[in-house]
Amino acid sequence: MIRGTVHIETEICKGCELCIAACPQDSLALSSNINRKGYRYVELVQDNCTGCVNCALVCPDSAITVFRQSKSAVRKIVSASV
Amino acid sequence: MYQFQYDSTPKLMKGNEALAEAALRAGMQGYFGYPITPQSEVLEYLTEHAPKRKNVVVLQAESEVASINMIYGAAGAGARVMTSSSSPGISLMQEGISYIASAELPCLLVNVQRGGPGLGTIQPSQADYFQATKGGGHGDYHLFVLAPSSVQEMAEHVFLGFHIAEKYRMPSLVLADGALGQMLEKVLLPKDGSLPYAEKSWATTGKTKDRERNIITSLHIDPNKMEMINLQLQDKYRKLKQEIRFEEINTKDADIILVAYGLTARICQKAMDLAKEKGIQVGVVRPITLYPFPYEILSTLAEKASAFLTVEMNAGQMVEDVRLAINGKRPVFFKGRMGGIIPNPEEILLEIETIAEKQQLKNIYA
Amino acid sequence: MNTITIPDEMELVYSKPETITDTPLHYCPGCTHGVIHRVLMEVVNEMGIAEQTVGVAPVGCSVFAYNYMNIDMQEAAHGRASAVATGIRRVLPEKYVFSYQGDGDLAAIGTAETIHSVNRGENILIVFVNNGIYGMTGGQMAPTTLLGMVTSTTPFGREQSAMGYPIKMTDLVAQLPGAYYVTRQAAYTAATVRKLKKAIEKAFQFQTRKKGTCFIEVVSNCPSGWKMTPIEANDWLEKNMLPMYPLGDLKVPKE
Ligand SMILES: Cc1ncc(C[n+]2csc(CCOP(=O)(O)OP(=O)(O)O)c2C)c(N)n1
Ligand code: SF4
Ligand code: SF4
């Protein structure tokens, strides 16, 4: 499985939860903390993100940046496993 | 003061056509308008003659609402643009004009007035004076308002209007009337291409890397910011006072001063001559800029003259500004015709004689 | 802009385009306007046309679009965005020009400007955000409001006998010969956002052909006006808005 991760700009997040619904991996959830605007923001709660970008696409506030395992890193893992 | 450069030979032209030809010579880059009598010749002339030139857009819009908003867009994109209409069409444009004034976009508007209110008549009128000089649309704003009184000025005021609009970043309005638009007169046109373009670094022409993005807007939600914008506008209108223009005829020894603009100023001159034959000393002040209004000259003349008579083709609009200028120092009388009727010199003379009698001027001169 | 360090052995696959400013959006949580803004600006960024693009914001919730889109922009009077865009494009014929308008703006007060801009085949892109309601003024009925839908001015639901039918502006526009590319998209799931982006890309590419108007409706939500959570709103959109406003191309030029 390709590994990915997200960076969520918690001060921008309005806690609309659309990304949570869009994530096929259930990697995201609302935090119990609130940001300075008073919104419960979203955070990554599982280490199973694949970097599919779905969450960032539906985020109205462009709060999400997505990373994915680089190709060279993927190659390294593949060669290590053979 | 703006210096005109002229052709060497005069032409015989209709007011509306002289205005349209002047727009092309002034380097107008876009015209957006909708037909309405008595100014449709402007659009007709331009659709015929603009294609001979490079880079002039002439578009018949679906309404005056659309045309004024096309003006907003094109002026905001930095082009020298103009629209023209007549009274009902100008009413329809008022929201857009308010936006243009607020966003400080230079452009030229032309109102070839006809009689109202309502659909009214297609005959000439001056009943849009309040609308033109006191705001017209919503909010505290003004236009630079020019009142031509000849075909010659129909042409000149296009140049002057564009010049002031770009110098101050504000809309100018040429306030003509149906008679001026339709009359045929000799005109010495301003020279083609003799109006340089102003620099417009604020225009939305595409954000290049070396500058911040340009935004054309009239929206300022923060009341403090909105008040600041208003103060800036008011400051601009104060500076605009240096552009005041008027004409004085025989005012030096006049006992009665006629105040009139545009077409009625010409008729007043005729009445002045008739009065002279009757031994009454009459002078004429013709405001050329209606906004800013030449208050000062009237106030100065009130020191010597004994009465003022304002003549308009309306129920009494500019007369309020004349009274403000005179400030109770002398009586200010009013003679108006409405509904598209042009007053004749004889009825103005009658008025002059009545005033002379009231002021006991007649026995001095008779 | 906050700097985000790329985690070890990872590469960046998605971030906000530089054509979107760092100003926080004023929209309600979950509102589609933000997604559409970003997708539009992504395309402008990726096509490298930010320096040649001028946008027009409407009156409606997206009146401040110019605060978020990092390009030259104008803010039009209510309903007049396509006339303003016409004015811009006519004097700057080599630039990319788009208007961004809500359903009240485009399909009520600005109907005449919309129809005639498209009928003239103005070489502009019109982005039509259809959320079935007047968001900005507090959730009143829009011309696109569904029958039976409760709004602050149809407290008992929109009734056809009094208020007429929901208007299908995009279908109307597609009838006009001046329309070059007409499509109805959405932006409530990752898949619909991807499709919307493709449509916007096409529309900007088509502009250089100077063959007519590109018109993209985006069926959108208004969680505040609809009085729903964003998730409920998107659900409701799928079940109620899409049957009335089905997604897909209405007019596609021959390649
Ligand atoms: C001439 C004029 N009339 C009315 C208004 C008030 N107004 C502002 S926004 C709006 C409706 C906007 O609705 P829509 O276009 O659907 O956009 P949304 O807010 O839903 O995004 C109205 C009626 C106005 N600003 N100007
Ligand atoms: S990138 Fe995909 S898997 Fe990762 S959090 Fe976002 S939606 Fe979930
Ligand atoms: S009122 Fe509706 S359209 Fe406006 S920002 Fe809120 S959710 Fe979006």
Image (cartoon, coloured by chain):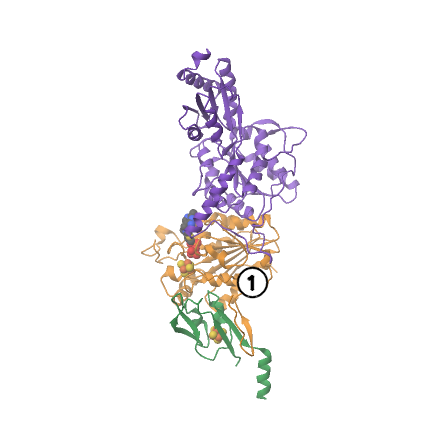
Chain colours: A green, B purple, C orange
**Pick the front one: B147 or A4:** B147
Q: Is residue B348 above or below residue C45?
A: above
| Count of number-bearing discs | 1
Residue B324 visible here: yes
Task: Specify the farthest residue to the left.
Answer: C156
**Pick the front one: C23 or C91:** C23
Subunit that carries the residue with mark 1:
C
**Residue occupying the point 59% across, 78% down:** A71
Q: In this view, does A14 lie above or below B17?
A: below
The residue where tag 1 is placed is C43
**Residue occupying the point 58% across, 64% down:** C46
Identify the secondary structure beneath mark 1: helix
**Pick the front one: B96 or B302:** B302
Task: Specify the farthest residue to the right.
Answer: B8
Residue C143 visible here: no
Q: Quadrant location of the N terminus of chain B?
A: top right
**Pick the front one: C77 or B309:** B309
> Picture quarter containing residue B339?
top left
Q: Position of residue B250 (x, y in %)?
A: 53, 21
> Picture quarter containing residue B180?
top right
Q: Where is residue B252 in the image (x, y as percent from the top left)?
A: 51, 21
> Picture quarter containing residue C156?
bottom left
Q: Which amino acid does label 1 sit on?
A: Val
